[in-house]
Image (tube, rainbow, N blue to C red):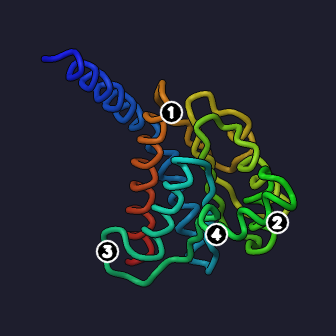
């Protein structure tokens, strides 16, 4: 094998190791799915927020809920707070970037809704502010963070502290966990 191929093999081993360790957190993922399913069953909305790659994952998961994951069924109420560029830029300009998600929650959310926040560090200021706003409104929260947990771990109703040494591995665990959650929620609500 070439040295580049060895590097790739090492990267894939890191991913495989992190995903294997994610299995130790299956109960937390199931609990989050139950929280989301219960809220959606009652007519609530699922909100998602995160930065960078985590923002893209929020869009991805919102689409799985509003469209479909595996089953043909009615759409579920889900909104990625990362997608409205006019709102994001106006709020960031007028109120600061740390408020881009909390301000949208203030306008859109109600008690009984659910907020999922993704932050590999567990300390993204705009996600932390969104969790503070969620607590004021009565929105349930689930944090998807890295192994150290960060500030969000102590603020969330449920927290997945994903394994992984590198941001990419943590994000890979987040998307695998979010897909498992989608599968559980979809089967629960479609039955």
- Report, in whole angstroms, how far the alpha carbon at label 4 lies from the one at label 1: 25 Å
Q: Nearer the viewer, residue 125 or 180?
A: 125
Q: Residue furthest left?
A: 1
What's the residue at 51%, 62% (across, down)?
59
Q: Which residue is mark 2?
A: 137
Q: Residue at x 79, y 73 (%)?
A: 107
Q: CA distance from mark 2 to mark 1?
A: 31 Å
> Which of the two discs, 4 and 1, labels the residue nearer the N terminus?
4
CB of mark 4 within 8 Å of CB of mark 2?
no
**Residue holding disc 3:** 71
Asked whether the residues under the numbered discs 4 and 1 touch, taking CB atoms below 8 Å apart as contact, a structural biologist would say no
Q: Which label number is shown at residue 84?
A: 4
Quadrant of the image occupied by residue 7? top left
Which is nearer the N-term, disc 3 or disc 2?
3
Marks 3/2: CA–CA distance:
32 Å
Mark 4 or mark 3, whichever is nearer to me: 4
The percent coordinates of residue 72 (x first, y second) are 32, 80
The location of residue 95, given as percent across then percent down, is 87, 58
Closer to us: mark 2 or mark 1?
Answer: 1
Q: Going from the N terminus, do you reach mark 4 or mark 2 first?
A: 4
């Amino acid at each position: 094998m070439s040295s580049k191929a060895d590097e790739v093999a090492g990267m894939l081993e890191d991913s495989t190791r992190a995903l294997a360790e994610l299995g130790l957190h299956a109960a937390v993922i199931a609990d989050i799915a139950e929280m989301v399913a219960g809220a959606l069953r009652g007519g609530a909305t699922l909100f998602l927020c995160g930065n960078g790659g985590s923002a893209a994952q929020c869009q991805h998961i919102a689409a799985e809920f509003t469209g479909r994951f595996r089953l043909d069924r009615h759409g579920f109420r889900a909104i990625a707070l990362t997608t409205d560029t006019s709102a994001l830029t106006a709020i960031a300009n007028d109120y600061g970037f740390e408020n881009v998600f909390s301000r949208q929650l203030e306008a859109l959310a109600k008690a009984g809704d659910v907020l999922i926040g993704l932050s590999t560090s567990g300390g993204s200021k705009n996600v932390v502010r969104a969790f503070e706003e969620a607590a004021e409104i009565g929105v349930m929260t689930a944090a998807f963070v890295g192994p150290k947990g960060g500030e969000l771990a102590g603020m969330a109703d449920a927290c997945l502290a994903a394994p992984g040494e590198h941001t990419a591995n943590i994000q890979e665990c987040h998307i695998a966990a979010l897909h498992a959650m989608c599968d559980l929620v979809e089967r629960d609500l479609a039955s």
